[in-house]
Image (spheres, rainbow, N blue to C red):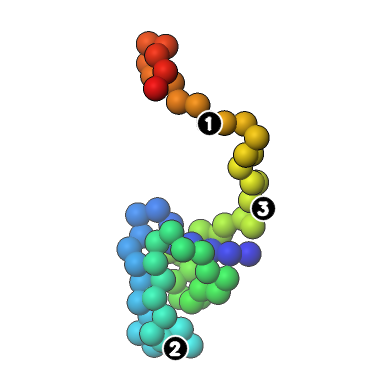
Amino acid sequence: MNYRLKKGQENIVIMGGPFEGKKFVRGVEYSEIPPEEKHRFEKVGTDFKPVSKTKPATKSIAGGGEL
């Protein structure tokens, strides 16, 4: 299971213990986190669905126009 900082949490630099000197940055996934900071992280599933490359992405504009 991987973890990342919850939305709205600031980056963390650990000052002591087994994670001393380790920096945890928003948007980055970690396999191990400091137990005392667990409340600041959320679990991230490892089941990622690949984006289909056979179907082109389209963008529409309100009013029916195309770019």
For the residue carrying disc 1, how many other residues have a C-alpha within 10 Å: few (<14), some (14-19), or many (20+)? few
- Give the numbered dot on residue 47: 3
Tell me where residue 2 appears, x and y as whole percent: 58, 64
Residue type at tag 3: Asp
Nearer to us: label 1 or label 3: 1
Number of numbered discs visible in the structure rendering: 3
**Picture layout, residue 2 above or below residue 53:** below
Tell me where residue 42 appears, x and y as whole percent: 51, 59
Residue type at tag 2: Gly
Numbered disc 2: secondary structure:
helix
Q: Which residue is mark 2?
A: 17
The one nearer the camera, 6 or 35, is 6
Please give the name of the residue rendered at 40% of the width and 53% of the height, measured from the top-left corner.
7
Nearer to us: label 2 or label 1: 1
Regarding residue 5, the answer to whether it shows in the image is yes
Residue 22 lies in what quarter of the image? bottom left
Residue 27 lies in what quarter of the image? bottom left
Please give the name of the residue rendered at 62% of the width and 31% of the height, measured from the top-left corner.
55
As measured in the structure, the alpha-carbon distance from the residue carrying label 2 to the one carrying label 1 is 47 Å
Tell me where residue 10 appears, x and y as whole percent: 32, 63
As measured in the structure, the alpha-carbon distance from the residue carrying label 1 to the one carrying label 3 is 22 Å
Numbered disc 3: secondary structure:
loop
The one nearer the camera, 56 or 25, is 56
Sequence-wise first label, 3 or 2: 2
- Give the numbered dot on residue 4: none
Sequence-wise first label, 2 or 1: 2
Q: Which residue is mark 1?
A: 57
Residue type at tag 1: Ala
Nearer to us: label 3 or label 2: 3
Left or right of 8? Residue 40 is right
Sequence-wise first label, 1 or 3: 3
Do the residues bearing badges 3 and 2 touch, measured as CB atoms within 8 Å?
A: no
